[in-house]
Amino acid sequence: MSSLQKQALKMKCPLPPMGNVPGASAGSRRRRDLTPTTWQRYFSSAEDVQLDGGDVFHVYRSGSSGPLLVLLHGGGFSGLTWALFTERIVQSVDCQVLAVDMRGHGETASADEKDLSMERLVSDLTSVVSAVYGPAAPPAVLVGHSLGGALAVHAAHAWCCGPLVGLVVIDVVEGTAVDALGAMHTFLRGRPERFASVQHGIEWCVKSGAVRNAESARVSVPGQLKNVKTDAPATRDLEEEDEDEQETPAAPQPSPPPTAAQSYTWRIDLASTEPHWQGWFRGLSGLFLSAPPPKVLLLAGIDRLDRELSVGQMQGKFQIQVVPRSGHAVHEDVPDRVAGIVATFLVRNKLTHALDGFQTIPPGC
């Protein structure tokens, strides 16, 4: 175990671990297919939404009826982090999905990518949903992971895009998140700065345990990277490769060996967002407890719960579900389990109906 991982564990830090994937031998990791893949299998469509002022937000959609699940990713991720979750939940209950690439992330292009203040993120979100659905927006459930969870909580208090009927927050708690900020720069410095290929980035994320599910990493990690030479999101390169392969089918090629001219880096410089870190998480527990719709909190471990939320949970103010055998990217590591929990939440609150074959999950920790 690295000194950084020990520090994170000591602080009950919700950051991704830096060690190897638990229970995976070196041989089993080598046998995995870690070639990058695109969004088409998991979502029905991908669209660019242009807002007043010229900013263009990239979104992924699926489903055509039922409540709208607005999926909000964590810092450094993209809407593709919800790929496997989306595939599972639209097979479980009647619902629609809108997964948004936040400002500075994925394929979204904005004039000011460094303004990741919570006020700006909330404004972006409401503008995107309004642009896509207009005044006929369906009842919405905000579902957010990490920074996206904080955004979901803040947006719940400012929602103006039709009825807000549910709130789902995944692995973010004010107390542990604020404590973890002190280790954030150390964590970020521990990551490779560049990768020789998109596949090398996927391999690192799986082997480090940042994403423990190889299938999810294949589709989500490209959304975290960009081409150093062109400054374009790595997903654009994959889409161009897919078009070329459709014209001239070819056998899959292995990942190229590392070279001095490494060509992919992280889509967003998270260290540069430090001025906004405190604003993302300060006061989050109180805001979560006071949010009006029914709500559920999913955690990778019960030790992440802070005092204010512990009291609120005992008072029955929200539902809690602990998801074992997962890291910080809970919804990527165990998408079946998370989709089942969210689907059960929707059915039990009479927000939708189950599709044939879906079995609700009992509540509890």
Image: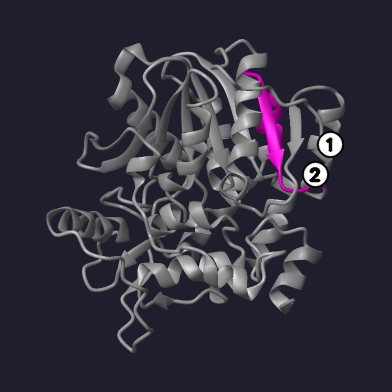
Where is residue 350? Give x, y as percent. Answer: 61, 10
CB under 8 Å between discs 1 and 2:
yes
Where is residue 124? Give x, y as percent. Answer: 37, 37
The three-letter code of the residue at mark 1 reads Ser
The foreground one among 321 and 252 is 252
Crowdedness near tag 1: few (<14), some (14–19) or many (≥20) residues, C-alpha within 10 Å: few
Q: Which mark is residue 200?
A: none
As drawn, is 309 to the left or to the right of 233?
right
Residue that protrudes farthest toward the bottom in the picture = 260
Is residue 256 magenta-colored?
no
Q: Secondary structure at mark 1?
A: helix
User: Residue at 36% across / 27% down in the picture?
Assistant: 129
As drawn, is 44 to the left or to the right of 18?
left
Query: Does residue 42 lie above or below 17 as drawn?
Result: above
Is residue 297 magenta-colored?
yes
- Tag 1 residue: 310
The foreground one among 228 and 205 is 205
- Tag 2 residue: 306
**Quarter the N terminus occupies:** bottom right
User: Residue at 77% across / 58% down in the picture?
Assistant: 12
User: Residue at 69% across / 74% down in the picture?
Assistant: 4
Where is residue 104? Give x, y as percent. Answer: 36, 53
Where is residue 141? Give x, y as percent. Answer: 53, 24
Does residue 150 appear in the picture of this structure? Answer: no
Per the rendered image, the range of residues in magenta is 285-302
Among the 4 quarters of the image, the one containing residue 15: bottom right
Distance Cα–Cα, label 1 vs label 2: 6 Å
Q: Secondary structure at mark 2?
A: loop
How many labels, in total? 2
